[in-house]
Image (cartoon, rainbow, N blue to C red):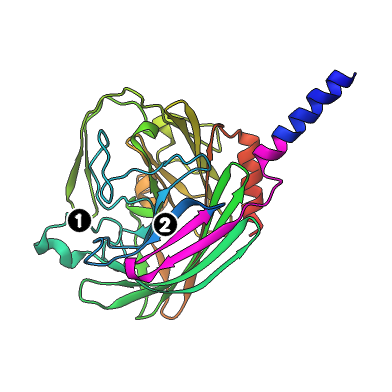
Amino acid sequence: MEKIKLILFTAFVFFTLQCGNQSNKVEFVRNDAEKKVDVMIDGQLFTTFLWHDPTLRDIKKPALYPIITSTGTEITRGYPLNPRPGERTDHPHQIGLCFNYGHVNGYDFWNNSTAIPENLRDRYGTINHLGIDKLSSTPGQGLMISRESWVTSSGQELLSEKTEYYFIAKGPLRIIDRITTLTATNGDVAMKDTKEGGFGIRVARQLEMPSDEELILTDTQGIPTKVGRMSNEGITGNYKNSNGIEGEAVYATRGDWVILSGKIGDEEQSVVMIDHPANPGHPTYWHARGYGLLLANPLGAGEYSNGKNIMDFKIAAGQSATFRFRLVVCSNKILTDAEINDLTAEFAKK
């Protein structure tokens, strides 16, 4: 009996340490000179909020990059900011974790990057960072509130943005809740159906799906991008959505969540993206690509349904729309459907 009690007690202690009954310390390190805010959990880098500066990094929207698990494993692709040997170098606009859209009054905010030829840049928009309004921490959670401006190539603002970022630590879980409010500041804003855009992350090479295909993908402006064949050694990723659909078939499905699971080295990884029931277009469409892009796109119904469900979302002049998304990462464990459903129900209350 005493041996059984000891085993049960040991299991309880392990569960407590793994599942986060302890409070993690979340801190922010703001560095305006380097145009970034580091998010630290128990003294370890979780992610960094980056924005554009011509002398530091020429990115066309703010992004969270890199994203690092509780064990110190980076699950985001390095390219284009910090290229690593053996990874893909397509789609330079797919940086870390971000939210934007490819058809805003005709301007493409999703595909914009330094790879766009000078003679075509008038078709693209930029999201400029304006300022940080709040940085605060409580046990296990940090809050950052930022302001951005969605501007055309001529500098006209179409949308003002206010975003609340909640950085949450629960034992091995690392969570980012993003709540973004967009306000139409210069007339009506039309966000026409397109598959190009939403809340997306580009992951490390090891979390891509094994594939022998060579793809040619075209953006909203008709510019093609080649995704070439590569070795499948160490490539372990697989998608599954909340309805049980797996692999490449997850693309263009709808659901509450998608998990991308796999291994980096010997370490199991879970990358989960969760939609919110208050979002326009809920349940969202999922743009899950085998080459490592996981994207929740709530506004692209027309393209994902082959024209059956046209949304053509609009924000009237002076009005606002709010979008809520959650990202969960976890090392050394593939999260179960039940665990993800609990995280989804918890987020739905926010």
Residue 48, label in figure:
2
Residue 221, label in figure:
1
Q: Which residues are magenta?
A: 15-40
Front-most of 212 and 233? 233
Q: Position of residue 318 (x, y in %)?
A: 44, 81
In magenta segment, residue 329: no
Q: Position of residue 100 (x, y in %)?
A: 37, 60
Front-most of 85 and 310? 85
Front-most of 170 and 199? 170
Q: Residue at x 45, y 47 (%)?
A: 285
Q: Residue at x 17, y 50 (%)?
A: 223
Going by the image, does 163 lie left or right of 148?
right
In magenta segment, residue 37: yes
Is residue 298 among what the camera can see? no
Is residue 81 among what the camera can see? yes
Q: Residue at x 35, y 44 (%)?
A: 306
